[in-house]
Amino acid sequence: MDIRPLTDSYAVSPQIAPEDVAAIAEAGYATVVCNRPDGEIPPELRAEEIRKAVEAAGLRFVLNPVIGGAITMENVQAQGAAMQDSDGPVLAYCASGNRSSIVWALSQAGKRPTDELVAVPARYGYALEPFRVTIDQLAQH
């Protein structure tokens, strides 16, 4: 598990496993968001298996599957709601952490400067520059 904090209250990670949940709870995360569709992963890492471990640890689990190249406004809104409704820091995961970074940045459009929304994920190798125009457009609404 490789937790990559984007802010004090939001971090991303590549795919997690049920055995990672204790460390996630110990690190102080209150909510775990799954941004990975079940069709991409083996049964033991599917959302329901992660949900069981997360809820058994007393954390909140949110399922918001994001399909690469087909991110929807529903995905963006669900990510924003998961963060807003959390009682503490949020850890979101997908295959690499990239999709979790993209929906974070899009959900924060207008709340944080676009340069920050692109630059912070870039520290971890996530290329959000192609989303700059979309972030700017969302910030106008």
Image: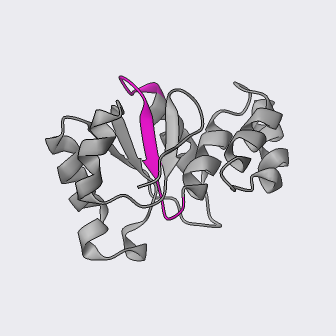
76 drawn magenta:
no
Tell me which residue sits at (71%, 33%) in the image: 109
Residue segment shown in magenta: 84-96
Query: Where is residue 38 drawn, in percent x and y?
Result: 36, 69
Quick check: 85 above or below 36?
A: above
Camera-nearest residue between 119 and 129:
119
Where, quadrant-wise, is the N terminus in this rendering?
bottom left
Query: Where is residue 49 drawn, in percent x and y?
Result: 22, 60
Tell me which residue sits at (72%, 26%) in the image: 112
Query: Where is residue 111 drawn, in percent x and y?
Result: 69, 24
Tell me which residue sits at (43%, 41%) in the image: 91
Tell me which residue sits at (75%, 37%) in the image: 138
> Horizontal placement of 60 versus 90: left or right?
left
Model colouring: one colour
Q: Main secondary structure of the magenta part?
A: loop
Q: Quadrant of residue 57?
A: top left
> Horizontal placement of 110 versus 62: left or right?
right
Q: Quadrant of residue 47?
A: bottom left
Where, quadrant-wise, is the C terminus in this rendering?
top right
Query: Where is residue 134 drawn, in percent x and y?
Result: 79, 46
> Horizontal placement of 72 versus 40: left or right?
right
Q: Farthest residue toward the left?
A: 56
90 drawn magenta:
yes
The mark tally for this picture is 0
> Horizontal placement of 7 versus 114: left or right?
left
